[in-house]
Image (tube, rainbow, N blue to C red):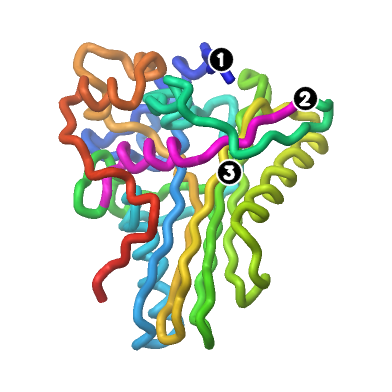
Amino acid sequence: MAHIPDLRARDVVNNAIGPFPKNCAGYMNPPVGGYGYIAALKLSIGTVVADMDEGLDGIVSYDRAECEDAYIGQINMLTASSFCGVNGAVWGYDLARHDDLANGLIQPKMVLPRHDGVPVPIMPLDPLLDAAYRLFGSRDERRFSPLPGAMVVCANKSQTINPKVETTVWCALAIAIAEDRSSTANLFIEDASDTETTGPAPLEEIERNIALSILRCGRDQGVAYREIFIGSKALTIPHGHVGCALACAPYVTLPPAAIPPGCEPGDLTEMTLSMWENQLGLTPMRPYPGVYRAFSD
């Protein structure tokens, strides 16, 4: 599907700059510099050996999930309902658009009909996960991560398990892009569970059901979504370990240092992700770790 330019996004991004020079700020953190916010997408799994009490093991595994992949460690995560609205823009989609999306290299996983019969492509989430990774950086390669200790509103869901027998923990995340961005919101759906709780289910089946739930929400709200991006991660957790699967979308404002010299923030809506990196002279990062990469205990 050809990308439909969103003229509204430029104004949103121009009003989504935070006060901290090199760190993203949580949306609504003072001093407020505008009405806009940027949503980024993250899926991660963290594990720890179960050698403390259950509460402490759960804290450490959750903390490790925040530090894996796109780095959002050291934040105070505040849970919000799951919409990216008229005054929001999606990193990697509306601005600093991922090159694979810009070049039409991403193919649908499936196509499902919405309530009015129009076919909706269900796309891989990988480009948007990679885009967030390249905005925030990683645990070892920091870029514009949220300010340590910031209050960051996130659409999020997590599952923490300390299994009695080997169990798979999983998380999934989707964003549905509204057809009319000037009057309706994009929708996030986050899900997380484990096979001990829900029984075994292929990730493809989980993703299909999430897409169906989005289309039903669209029918109920009278909102038409033109495309859905969806992804999932899973990891087998042996007995004696604790695992935490996290699906989240932080709502942030960008730091001034993330805007290339001589540009307005809104100019990012005309750039691909690699153009943004090149204009800032950023050191290339290691490839996005699409599969689980364990911490050392």
**Do the residues under discs 2 and 3 have CB atoms within 8 angstroms?**
no
Disc 1 designates what residue? 4
Image coordinates for residue 42, horizontal then vertical, percent = 44, 48
Image coordinates for residue 103, horizontal then vertical, percent = 43, 20
Mark on residue 174? 3
In 3D space, how far apart are the residues under numbered discs 3 and 1 (Cα atoms)?
A: 20 Å
Count how many numbered circles sit on residues in the image. Answer: 3
Q: What residue span does the magenta drawing correspond to? A: 118-138
Q: Amino acid at mark 2?
A: Val
Q: Residue at x 46, y 85 (%)?
A: 239
Disc 2 designates what residue? 118
Q: Residue at x 66, y 20 (%)?
A: 180
Name the image quarter holding residue 159: bottom right
Taking the magenta stretch, the answer to whether it contains residue 168 is no
- Estimate how packed mark 2 is, as few (under 14), some (14 to 19) or many (20 or more) residues with alpha carbons within 10 Å: few
Q: Residue at x 52, y 13 (%)?
A: 5
Q: Nearer the viewer, residue 245 or 154?
A: 245
- Is tag 2's residue or tag 1's residue first in the polypeptide sequence? 1
- Is tag 2's residue or tag 3's residue first in the polypeptide sequence? 2
Rendered-image quadrant of the C terminus = bottom left
In 3D space, how far apart are the residues under numbered discs 2 and 1 (Cα atoms)?
A: 17 Å
